[in-house]
Every structure is written in C-alpha cells, then in structure tokens.
Amino acid sequence: MSRLGKVLFLFAGLSLITFAIGRSVLGSWIPFFWALVGLTVFFTGVAVFIDRKFFVEIFSMKTTKHGMNMGAMVVLVIALLSVVNYLGVKKNKTWDFSTAQRNSLSDQSVQLLKGLGDDLRVSYFYKKGDRGNEETRREFRELIKKYQDQTDKIKLDFYEVNEARTKAEEYGVTKGSGVVFLEYKGKRNRIEKIDEQEITQALIKVTREKNKTIYFTVGHQENDLDDGKEALGLNRFKLMIENNSFNVKTFNPTTQPQVPDDADAVAIIGPRKAFLDYEVKAIEEYLKKGGQVLLALEPKNTAGLEKILETVGVSPQNNFIKSSFMGLGFIDGPTVGDGFSSTHSATKVFSGRREVVQMEWPMELKLASPAPSGITLEAILRTSAQSAALPSPQVVEGKFAPGPYNIGVAAQGKYPGSVDGKKDFSLIVYGDSEFMVNSLLYLGLNRDLALNSISALAGEDNLISITPREIDKTEISMTSVKQSIFFFGIVLPLPLLMALSSVVLWVRRRSA
C-alpha cells in the first residue's frame, strides 16, 4: 500500500472517530455530522482508488479467499444466533409439565388478558434495604412474566419509594414495600398480596365497567350465605363470587314482591319451604323482563316452583340418582356428573376433561320434547350410563333403568307472556343444591360449575374458566410382595453387580 493511501485511511479513521465521539456526547444529530460522514467516505474512496491494484492482488490470493469464507461463516453464525435470541425474546414460549398446571395461569386469567384493548400499566413500589426486598421483586417479576407471555399490552414499571417521591405521593404510597397498582383506561386498583388470584381480581376490577349484582333469595330456609362453619352453609360460595368482583345481596320475596331492578341474576339455592303464589309470580315477572335465574333444588322438594319449571319445559322427577359400578352395585359416595354440554357457556370448558362434578343424591330433570314455543332447552350436565334412578335413598336393591340422566339443564328464550322487544330470559336448573355448600364446593369441578353458572347468567363470559387445581400428592403404595421384589430385584443385586464389575476390571488390568 502506498504512503498516500495510508495517510488517507488515517484521515478517514480520524473523521469517523470524531463523528462517533460527537454523536455520543451531544446525543442528537447536527448538520456538521454530515461533513464528517462525507469526509470519511471521501478519504476511504480515494485511498481505495489510488491503491486499487494492491487491493485486487490481495483479494485474488487464496489465503484471502479462505479468510473471507471463514469470515462469512462467522458472520452468518452470529446473524443466526442474533435472530434466534431475538425470536426467543419476542416469541417466548414455555411448557408446563406439572400435574396440576401450577406453573401456568388459569383459563380465567388468560381470557381476561385476551380481552385487553388498551395497555395495562403495572407499577411496583419498593424500598431499598427492606428485608427480603430482592426476593419479593424477583417472585413478582416471574409472576408478571406469565401475564406478559399472553399479551404485549402489559407495561411494567418499578419505582423506589425514596427515589421516586413524586410518583409515590401520586399513588399514595408513603410506607411499606411491595405495593402494586394496576391501571387500565383511567381506573386504578391497589394490590397488597402478590399472587395470581389477587392480580386477576384487580384485573377484573379495572377492566369491568361496573360490578354485576347477584341476588340470593331468603325466607324459604335456603342454604345460609353467611354460614362459614356448618357443612351446608354457602359462605364459601359467596366469598368466591365476591372475589370475582360480583356484588352479592339478598332479597326476600315474601316482603319484596318484586325482584330488585339492579339484579343481574337471581339465585335460589336449596329452598326447603315453598314459595307462595305471589312470590312465584314475582320470579315469573322477572323472567318475562329477560331475567337470569339459577335454581338448585333438592329431590322431593320443588318448593312450589313447579309452575315456572313446567312453563319452560323442565320436569323434575323427584327421584334419587346414584352412581353404580358396571352394574355390580352402587358406589358408596357422591353421585358423579361427567357429561358436559360442549355448547353451553357454563360447561363447554369442561368438555373432554376427565374430572367430574360430585353431588349428593341429585334428581333427574326431564326436558320437554318438543320444547315450548320460543324456548330452547339443553342438558348441560348428565350422569354416566353407570347410574340409576331410585325411588328413595333407602331402596338400593332391585332392577333400575340405567342412565345417563340429566341433572343439570338450561332454558333460554322468550318467557310466555313477555313483552315484545325484551331480551331473552336464561334459566339454569340443577337437581341438587349441596354441590355448592361448604363441605362439597371444592370437590372435583363443583366450584367451577357453580361459579361458571353465575358468570354465564350475569353475562360475564370472560370469567368462565377452570380454576387452578390444588397440588396433588403423589403417593406410592407397595404391598409386601412388591417390596420384596423391589429389594431382591434392584436394591440388593445392583451394588453386588457394581462390586463384581470393579473386581473384574481390576483383575484384567493387573493381567494386562
């Protein structure tokens, strides 16, 4: 290379370095930078032109070609790794192989995230120096990452309380650490406990325009909403509904002959005392206006609500359904429902699952064929074919017609006598009320079916889901024979085999 060429390359390098330093210091573009870029290109071009013969000879050498091939391969590998890392960040995918899916978000959380139309801002406030602060932040980041994997609309910010005083004062954070706020379309909700349930509940609150109100009837010896200790109380069910941001209220048709105007759905759970005619009429008037009713009855006690059921084409049989085992006898335990409608919003999420609903002596609910004019009927929960309808719990011997039987049905349409233009009514009826009580609520799919029925009637389809399962214990039960086989087949011979192999190897080495 000529001396002039070296000088020109030196000037080009100095121009490029001056441009890089100036750009980094100023942080913005100024017209002078065009001159530096132009000088770099000019000096480089002139130097290459002057020493063009030198560069032609260099690039025609075998060593140069091999080096360029190797350089090209290095560049391709670096580009491939960059693309893989970029896709790994932007298109992150995880798999959860745990039995209870404990490392995944519930279906409810995922559905809520899919419904986000705007950005959801998550603000985490903490204090430096607090004990366990880093561990709490790490756990929170891992939890929020599960939400961010579902949508790119979650924006996460961390604020140190003492460093971001203005922000902390705006949010009312004066002390404490690990406080989280969710903001969506101007609505803000504060979270103190960091777990999926709290975050999803806060997400419901900030995304819902208004909380729906569910009225439970009282005055007919229904299951008690406030009883959290007795087995037949409904307090756990009530708390579960409230945790999903519903307002739960009660009304007594005996003293209030009209369903409150703010009722989004009415639940009548396990009445043991009959409704009077004017009370039944109040429920009918509500259905004529397009009301939504959840009705759970016990066998031999339809509580005076036969008129409503007959009007919509549902006939309670007042029998007792019991599960059996391949026709060999009745199972000593709850009656299971494992046939779910794949079209009704309350049960379609269960279709194809192996889990079941567990009920105590439900009764059969027959559907009229054809259905009354303007009304659609559907069986949403059925027992298996290995079940039978008994006249009473005491009669367990004899020949009984095998199932399946409808133990949960839904009716929808125009209630006879309704005013034209009114929305359709919806009615969900179960032949048992005890699957919702404290003692049975958390068995199988009981809580999911109960809550999904409320959500479906209230028009909250984004809350219809399967809640996360509790962690299952894995137990190994071995008989004495299996223990002996395990000991003499694995535990005892394995060490002996290893010892024998060691001796053989040692002898062969000594003999070599």
Image: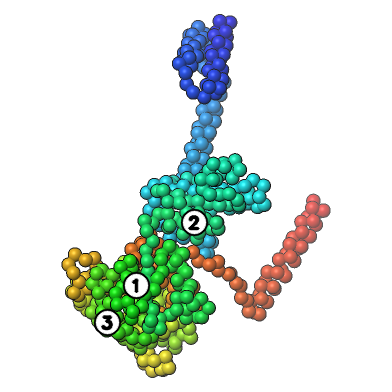
Q: Nearer the viewer, residue 111 or 304?
A: 304
Instruction: Report which residue position mark 3 lands on.
Output: 278
Q: Nearer the viewer, residue 428 or 329?
A: 428
Ranked by sequence position, the earlier of labels 1 and 3 is 1
The amino acid marked with disc number 3 is Tyr
The amino acid marked with disc number 2 is Ile
Instruction: Report which residue position mark 2 lands on.
Output: 199
SS label for mark 1? strand
Q: Which label belongs to residue 266?
A: 1
Residues marked 3 and 2 touching at CB (< 8 Å): no
Residue 231 drawn at (x, y percent): 50, 80
* Residue 483 visible in image: yes
- Give the foreground label among 3 and 2: 3
Identify the residue shown where x is 61% and y is 72%: 476
The amino acid marked with disc number 1 is Val
Q: Quadrant of residue 375?
A: bottom left
Residue 359 drawn at (x, y percent): 43, 80
